[in-house]
Image (cartoon, rainbow, N blue to C red):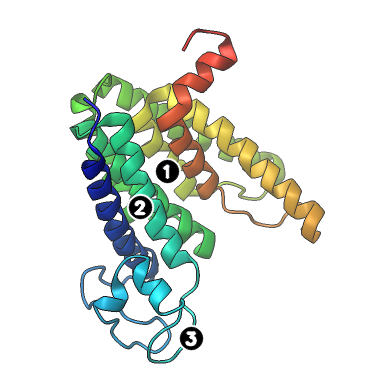
């Protein structure tokens, strides 16, 4: 049964609020700070954000993207992450309904958002975002629709193992490390929730996206071929694409009926 408009509205509102919390995680996790205490504060002056100014999207618009106390800008990441949280909640509700499968995949998308913005800023993917999630994904696999623990284990090995093999080969051929361990663990997590098909789709699509952006930067800004470009955001985007459209895209490519 298709959820009601009220249910979609509630999902969007919840997603926006969760997106606000994701901003806290993105900011504090790489610094080793608690993601619970203290409450939200300006990253520039440290003043506590008033509850009314902390409302998702509305608070940012109300303050015109600046701290009420020091007037320094917060940046566009904050409303963008909140919007992504709301969008993810609505998309999961539409695709999977109010189900355990939908809940697991929403948490997965939240992790992908966190990983994307941390990797963009610091070029790292913290183990605390992937390793515990990988274990939980294996426990959740038997309860997901049209999925199993065997598929999860196969996907984990396929995703992490394939990228690890590519990393080792690249390192031996070039003498430099081109793929980080965080990307390998991320692929293991992707495989644990999407199976080996999702792993292959994510790795191939992520590589295509990364290459396209790399060429664009090369042409637009004169970046050289050794400029470091984080791979995690492309893997995250490809994994999210597979979650919603992967099987249809594969069937279209192979010429099978959807």
Q: How far apart are marks 3 and 2 (CA)?
A: 25 Å
Q: Is residue 37 visible?
A: yes
Q: How crowded is mark 2: few (under 14 residues within 10 Å), some or many (20 or more)?
A: many
Q: Do the residues labelled 3 and 2 touch (CB within 8 Å)?
A: no
Give whichever of discs 3 and 2 has the lower sequence position.
3
For residue 136, above or below residue 70: above
Report the number of numbered marks. Answer: 3
Question: Disc 1 versus disc 3: distance between alpha carbons?
Answer: 34 Å
In the image, residue 141 above or below residue 8:
above
Identify the residue at image location x=40%, y=73%: 60
Residue drawn 21% across the image and 69% down it: 36
Disc 2, SS = helix
For the N terminus, give its image quadrant: top left
Q: Are marks 1 and 3 in contact (CB under 8 Å)?
A: no
Q: Which mark is residue 186?
A: 1
Front-most of 234 and 173? Answer: 234
Q: Which residue is drawn at 52% across and 35% down?
A: 163
In depth, the one of 92 and 31 nearer the eye is: 92
Q: Residue at x 32, y 81 (%)?
A: 41
- Residue 141 occupies which quadrant of the picture? top left
40 horizontally vs 76: left or right? left
Element assignment for label 3: loop
Q: In front: 99, or 43?
A: 99
Q: In this view, does 158 lie to the left or right of 220?
A: left
Q: Examine the rendered structure and indicate whether residue 22 appears above or below residue 257.
A: below
Residue bearing mark 2: 85
| Residue 20 coordinates in the image, percent (x, y) | 32, 63
Q: Where is residue 22 in the image (x, y as percent from the top left)?
A: 33, 60
Residue at which label 3 appears: 72
Residue 156 location (% of width, % of height): 37, 31
């Amino acid at each position: 049964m298709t959820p009601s408009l009220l249910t979609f509205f509630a999902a969007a509102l919840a997603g926006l609020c969760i997106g606000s919390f994701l901003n806290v995680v993105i900011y504090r996790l790489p610094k080793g700070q608690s993601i619970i205490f203290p409450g939200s504060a300006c990253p520039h002056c440290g003043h506590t954000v008033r509850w009314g100014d902390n409302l998702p999207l509305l608070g940012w618009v109300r303050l015109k993207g600046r701290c009420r106390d020091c007037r320094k800008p917060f940046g566009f990441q904050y409303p963008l992450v909140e919007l992504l949280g709301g969008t993810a909640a609505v998309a999961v509700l539409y695709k999977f309904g109010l189900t355990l499968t939908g809940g697991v995949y929403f948490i997965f998308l939240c992790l992908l958002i966190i990983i994307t913005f941390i990797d963009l800023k610091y070029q790292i993917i913290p183990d605390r975002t992937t390793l515990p999630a990988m274990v939980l994904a294996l426990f959740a696999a038997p309860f997901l629709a049209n999925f199993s623990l065997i598929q999860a284990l196969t996907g984990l090995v396929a995703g992490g193992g394939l990228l690890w093999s590519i990393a080792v080969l690249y390192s031996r051929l070039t003498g430099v490390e081109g793929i980080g361990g965080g990307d390998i663990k991320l692929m293991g997590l992707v495989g644990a929730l999407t199976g080996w098909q999702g792993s292959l789709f994510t790795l191939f699509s992520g590589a295509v996206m990364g290459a396209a952006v790399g060429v664009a930067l090369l042409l637009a800004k004169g970046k050289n071929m050794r400029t470091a470009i984080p791979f995690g955001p492309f893997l995250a985007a490809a994994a999210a694409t597979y979650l919603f459209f992967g099987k249809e895209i594969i069937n279209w490519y192979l010429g099978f009926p959807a």
